[in-house]
Image (cartoon, coloured by chain):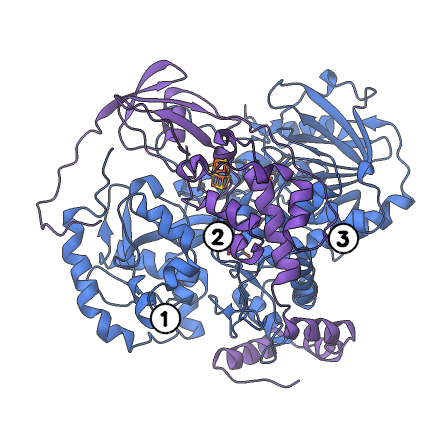
Chain colours: A purple, B blue
Amino acid sequence: MGRRTKGETPKEVEPRMVTIYFMGKAYQVPEGITIIKALEYIGYKLIRGVGCRGGFCGACTTFYRKKNDYRLYSGLACQTPVEDGMYLTQLPFVPAERRKYDINNVKPDVNTILSLYPEIARCVGCNACTKVCPQELPVMDAIQTILRGDLAKAAKMIFDCIACGACSMRCPAEIVHYNVFQLVRRLYGKYIAPKAKHLEKRVEEIENGNYEEQFKKLLSMSVDDWKVLAEKLQKGEDIVL
Amino acid sequence: MVEYPGYPPEFWDSIEKVEETREKRLKETFPKMPEAEREELVHKYHPDYKEGTKRPVRVGAYKGQLAPHEVVDLLEAHALINPNEIDLDDVDYDVDILIIGGGGAAASAALWANINGVPADRILMVTKLRFGDANTKMAQGGIQAADKEYDSPIYHFLDVLRGGHYTNDPELVKILVTEAPLIIKFLEDLGVMFDKEPDGTMIEVSGGGCSRYRMHSCGDYTGLEIMRVLMDEVLNREIPVLEFSPAVELITDDRGQVAGAVVMNLETGRYHVVRAKATVIATGGFGRLHIQGFQTTNHYGATMDGVVLAYRVGAQLRDMDSVQYHPTGAAWPPQLAGQLVTEKVRALGAQLVNIEGKQFVYQLEPRDVVSSAIIRECYDRKKGIRTITGWGVWLDSPMIEIIRGEGTIEKFLPAMLRQFKRYGIDIRKEPILVFPTLHYQNGGIVINKYTQVLDAKRKPIPNLFAAGECTGGVHGKNRLMGNSLLEITVFGRRAGIFTSKHIKKVSLGKLTLNHVVRWENMLKEAKIRTKRKAPIILPDYRGDVRYR
Ligand SMILES: Cc1cc2nc3c(=O)[nH]c(=O)nc-3n(C[C@H](O)[C@H](O)[C@H](O)COP(=O)(O)OP(=O)(O)OC[C@H]3O[C@@H](n4cnc5c(N)ncnc54)[C@H](O)[C@@H]3O)c2cc1C
Ligand code: SF4
Ligand code: SF4
Ligand code: FES
């Protein structure tokens, strides 16, 4: 983390160039820029393998190896800076099947998940999924937690999944984790999480037209009247129409 | 492994000042600015008011109105397609409802059309990137709705208007706020995981410009959570989605009605004809136009295509002169420049302070006010931090852990914590350097409460609808955080409902691209000479390392 050496101000220097190998071809790119920027720097106009450019959509999954390192890494191209000697390729698409279901006609238990995605029972506990997750989620543990039937816990464990598919490309049990996780989260959100009672009440009031009278008055007022009321609200005062 | 060292040494003197003043500041709240002072500040420092950055549009319904050069360039451009090269008799997709876009507004429209009886295979969604790769997924902070005892849709209404400087369309605002709780309920029933107390009460926090706590959230992945649930439901209902197939031009019939669109397969380069009885534009905003050279928070496809398409068939626009700059875009590290630092950081208590560790604005003023104050602090008072990309001021995030307890950041802002950690910055212990970034298209296509697109005379353009960030009116000249996730779900829903009724009355004539021919003539008459073509579909960053 941050260093507290009160050094001198670094001089403006030309960025150091590093060599990356994109699909086997060598290119010189400025050090420290993200993989997406590097590909554009090289001259690609990207269509696939890019979406939000901010780490939210999971479109830019990239696999790479590094110099003198046997391991296969993966990361989000929009978040991962290039390194010297990186060998990389983007994943344009993750072949995956999602199973259809009717959210109003399912039970929030592990059997629902097993009937739609029976392959999760084949998890061999290798942890390859966890190692590769750019969101650093406990992917294997989540699968095991689902198998144990604790959907509430699992839903929270993998809430931050952006469906990049990296885990699913590595899984020897051929599980499509993010589709399973989507199902788990919806089951939790709809059936297990307690409902907001105040929300139900407000919806009822609105459907009864409780606010229509007040809106009628409000809409017939002048902007200056609105301003007075709005400033009152800002001060924490309540208003009655 | 390259090690990212976090903040450079020359920032540390200032960071220490921020730390030294923190304890004292914890007890202080910077006073809210009086209305008159706010206005003066905004007029003097907001980029919208900067001279030489706008010009009047010379052609079409918005003629004579000012808009940023980058916007006018596209409004006055030639069509991308040559009408003679498209065989309109060869209809590739014949549907009742065509929805252009793949974000939250589009998905909502598709769902509600289907819920209201339009069979899935009579609907078609076309989108530029993948389904869901959109600004919607990037929304972190939350979604507003007045659903607690202490709150009221009336209060929400007044806050929205105050935020928009009373330039909003009140009729649309009323719909926004009264349908808000219905939408939250709908999402809850679909299985969206809102942040809740153990008894189910929604955890609601404050937001810039809000008089009451009404910001609902799903961690700091609110938009992602809403988007992926909507997507999942669209897919469960088997509504067809055509990815990597942006609409490049609308189609009209020989009676002047809108009748679908020409879409381009981005991978093969081939055009396809979609005939539809109703067409919904839900193409989102314009961040990727990098207005005034600003960095942006927006996704790769935010290039204002839908506005361009609607404009050529006569749509009126509004408030295109006002652009929302998010006050807190990342200013360090350079790899994250322009990326959003969600307003929730401020809502949770982080103050904005200058190079000396002094507050200079109440952190929860409306966005345009906060942005202007930051710009003043840097450009005028020179009390910001200089960086290689420009300037920045401190957003004192460690305060959150002090005020709300250790672990709050990890619980409520995991996405941000992760983003900065990759570059060696721990936002639980170190403040975040921020500067305004191009965030939101406040204005856009004029619609009525049925989401019908209106022309210069406020008459509906037959069979054309629009919803979401591409439209104007709901937010007037300034949107408050949490109201656009709301807008897209409320008005997307309405687009779905009203098109499902509308298509029963429609009969289409012969397909044409007459409006394109007419457009080219209008350009000639207005003596507009340009090589530009629009929509631009994707920005071109080849060889360019300036923007993220
Ligand atoms: C980083 C960030 C954070 C935000 N945080 C919040 C928040 O906390 N709360 C809040 O309320 N709002 C927030 N917003 C704003 C909000 O997310 C957006 O305004 C809203 O999601 C827009 O939804 P939309 O459906 O109109 O557009 P989008 O979600 O952008 O969807 C537009 C879709 O149309 C597609 N498209 C574009 N052109 C074409 C074409 N020619 N043909 C076919 N498809 C096309 C795009 O690819 C995309 O799929 C945030 C925005 C950003 C960028
Ligand atoms: S769980 Fe799998 S799909 Fe989700 S973010 Fe992690 S690697 Fe990607
Ligand atoms: S990669 Fe597959 S098999 Fe291995 S732990 Fe993960 S889910 Fe189980
Ligand atoms: S482009 Fe969306 S996560 Fe990288």
The residue lying furthest to the top in this view is A25
Say what amino acid the circle numbered 1 marks.
Answer: Arg
Give the residue pinned by disc 2: A157
> How far apart are the alpha carbons under marks 1 and 3?
40 Å
> How far apart are the alpha carbons under marks 2 and 1?
22 Å
- Relative to A74, is B68 on the left or the right? right
Q: Secondary structure at mark 3?
A: helix
- Determine crowd level at label 2: few under 14, some 14-19, many 20+ residues with C-alpha closer than 10 A: some
Q: Residue at x 68, y 57 (%)?
A: B490
Residue B510 location (% of width, % of height) = 87, 27
Identify the disc placed on residue B404.
1
Residue B105 location (% of width, % of height) = 65, 48
- Relative to B534, is B113 on the left or the right? right
Q: Residue at x 39, y 61 (%)?
A: B345
Is disc 3 in the same subunit as disc 2?
A: yes
Give the residue pinned by disc 3: A105
- Viewer-side label of 2, 1: 2
Say what amino acid the circle numbered 3 marks.
Answer: Asn
Proximity of marks 1 and 3: CB atoms separated by less than 8 Å: no
**Mark 3 or 2 closer to N-term?**
3
In terms of depth relative to the viewer, which is nearer, A79 or A164? A164
Residue B481 location (% of width, % of height) = 51, 60
Q: Secondary structure at mark 2?
A: helix
Say what amino acid the circle numbered 2 marks.
Answer: Met
